[in-house]
Amino acid sequence: MMKTQFKLAFISLALMAFVACDSTSIKETTYSDGALKTQTPYNDEGRIHGERKEYNRDGQLIQTETFNNGKKEGLSRVYYSNGQIKEEVMFKNGKENGAYKTYNDRGDLILQMNYKDGKKFGPFKQYNAETLQLIEEGSFGEKEQLDGIYKQYNKEGLPLSEQSYKDGKKDGKFVYYKGAGEIDREEMWSMA
């Protein structure tokens, strides 16, 4: 009986110590009229830790960000006043890292790209916010510069140009289109 009580007391103390080590307090800020503006969780070291929320004057949620010990970590979102997601980006150790997307106020995807250690990296696509036609696509290299084939389209989705880049410099064939996708002119570029 005594052993069981001792074990229960030990487990209870261990749990209380664990919870106390990971406690957070919420700081709220308000607009001049008293409406809630932000809710920010802080850990015992005074660093933002958890999900921070921001609201407009009407009480509508306009931004959420997740922090881990003072650094952004995980998904951050910005919202339109109608509640639709406007922008979302992944963070790791305080830097953009992973998918980045923007949407129009109807919730349609209009830009998708990736980040790596806080820099644009990899393929991207951008769409017209009204027609949702693809208007440009390409890829960013290590130094946030165009790398590979970059294409532009008009609002009907017909090609305007196709360009070749290497580390942000023109390198290779550039094709410019007119009208219904007819070639207007071609250029050759070399980094040499």
Image: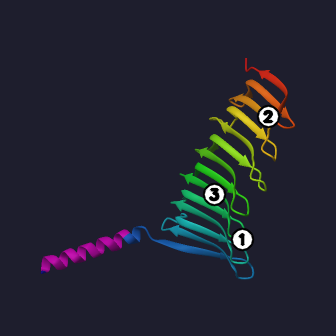
Residue 88 badge = 3
Would you name the residue on which mark 2 appears? 161
State the SS at label 1. loop
In terms of secondary structure, what is the magenta stretch mainly? helix
Quarter of the image with the N terminus is: bottom left
**Residue type at mark 1?**
Asn
The vertical placement of 115 against 175, above or below, is: below
The vertical placement of 169 against 52, above or below, is: above
Determine the image quadrant of residue 174.
top right
Q: Position of residue 45 (x, y in %)?
A: 49, 65
Judge by depth and name the residue closer to the eye, 166 or 16: 166
Do the numbered discs 1 and 2 sit on residues whose CB atoms are within 8 Å?
no
Of the two numbered discs 1 and 3 in the rendering, the one whose residue sits closer to the viewer: 1
Q: Is residue 118 visible?
A: no
Label 3 Cα neighbours within 10 Å, binned few <14 / some 14-19 / many ≥20: many
Would you name the residue on which mark 1 appears? 82
